[in-house]
């Protein structure tokens, strides 16, 4: 029962913090923050507490396959919405995600998932350079209901995954862990309100954050059994933050160098 109340408390507070940071410091930082393993860390933490650390370790391959599928979907959405309207882009991106998820699960390999994700991140960084060729548009403030909606959806997803973990098994539970509960609505709303320039910032930041997410899951995989879930998640999140900050700095420096 204590774990249930923690889910109800921690998850919406984290979503609220990221959403407010996005409102205060802009979509590029929002993309980076939404790319960090926020929901993923909570899912892995509660999976371990409720199903055991071995279950969490077995969920890592599925989680890394999910990261690859999600990044592929972001890239697909960004490219296809050059011609498609936003609603059609969302529908086709969902279909593409399901197909990509099936393929990545079929591969069932940590190495393949990581390699595919790295290739996709490189592709995302390239196609979103300089706003993906778009210019900034006037940005409209988010409706008041958007942030509560994100908080509610994140909490419901966490409750759903952890409650059905025993039935789903570690692979399916892991695959659901990195679903971008905050990042996907953030990307779509940014696209609707700020155009492709703002969408590029979200997708780019989330792609950079995906490299840190890989570090998070690898840390959990290696440390959860010998060190316990609390240490594994703490070290994994710290590693994800360090990797994301470093890569963001490298990419930004390179972008400025090319611009000059």
Image (cartoon, helix red, strand yellow):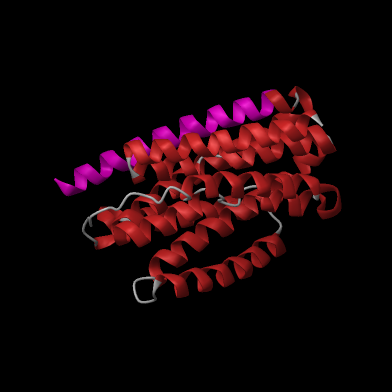
x%, y% of residue 144? 43, 47
Give the position of the C terminus as an image quadrant.
Answer: top left
The answer to whether residue 258 is magenta is yes
49 within the magenta span: no
Which residue extends farthest front? Answer: 144
Q: Position of residue 104 (x, y in %)?
A: 65, 61
The residue closer to the viewer here, 227 or 180, is 180
Horizontal and vertical percent position of residue 67: 58, 52
Which segment did they paint magenta? 231-260
Overall secondary structure of the magenta section: helix
Residue 40, image quadrant: top right
**Which residue is at a point 64% across and 63% down the rendered structure image?**
101
Q: Quadrant of residue 226?
A: top right
Give the residue at x 60% y 52%: 179
The answer to whether residue 126 is visible is no
Counting labels gives: 0
How far across and how far down the image is residue 108, in percent?
A: 71, 57
Q: Is residue 38 left or right of residue 3?
A: left
Image position of 105 with respect to 63: above or below:
below
Q: Is residue 241 above or below residue 82?
A: above
Instruction: Please state which of residues 93 and 160 is positioned toward the viewer in this rendering.
Output: 160
Indicate left or right for 250 with 175 as reference: left
Taking the spot 35% from the left edge, 46% from the top edge, the residue there is: 27
Can residue 21 be seen? yes
Q: Is residue 124 left or right of residue 156?
A: left
């Amino acid at each position: 029962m204590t774990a249930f109340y923690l889910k109800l408390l921690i998850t919406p507070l984290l979503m609220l913090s990221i959403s407010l940071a996005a409102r205060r410091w802009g979509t590029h930082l929002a993309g980076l923050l939404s790319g960090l393993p926020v929901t993923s860390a909570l899912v892995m933490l509660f999976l371990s507490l409720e199903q055991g650390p071995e279950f969490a370790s077995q969920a890592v391959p599925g989680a890394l396959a999910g990261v690859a599928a999600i990044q592929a979907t972001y890239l697909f959405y960004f490219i296809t919405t050059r011609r498609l309207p936003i609603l059609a882009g969302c529908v086709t991106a969902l279909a593409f995600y399901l197909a990509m998820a099936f393929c990545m699960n079929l591969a069932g390999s940590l190495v393949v998932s990581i390699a595919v994700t790295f290739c996709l991140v490189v592709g995302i960084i390239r196609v979103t350079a300089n706003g993906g060729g778009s210019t900034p548009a006037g940005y409209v403030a988010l409706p008041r209901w958007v942030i509560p909606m994100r908080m509610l959806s994140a909490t419901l997803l966490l409750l759903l995954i952890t409650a059905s973990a025993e039935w789903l098994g570690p692979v399916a539970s892991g695959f659901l862990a990195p679903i971008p509960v905050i990042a996907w609505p953030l990307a779509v709303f940014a696209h609707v309100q700020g155009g492709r320039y703002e969408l590029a910032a979200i997708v780019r930041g989330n792609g950079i954050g995906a490299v840190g997410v890989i570090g998070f899951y690898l840390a959990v995989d290696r440390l959860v059994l010998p060190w316990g879930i609390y240490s594994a998640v703490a070290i994994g999140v710290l590693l994800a933050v360090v990797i994301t900050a470093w890569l963001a700095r490298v990419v930004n420096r390179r972008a400025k160098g090319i611009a000059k």
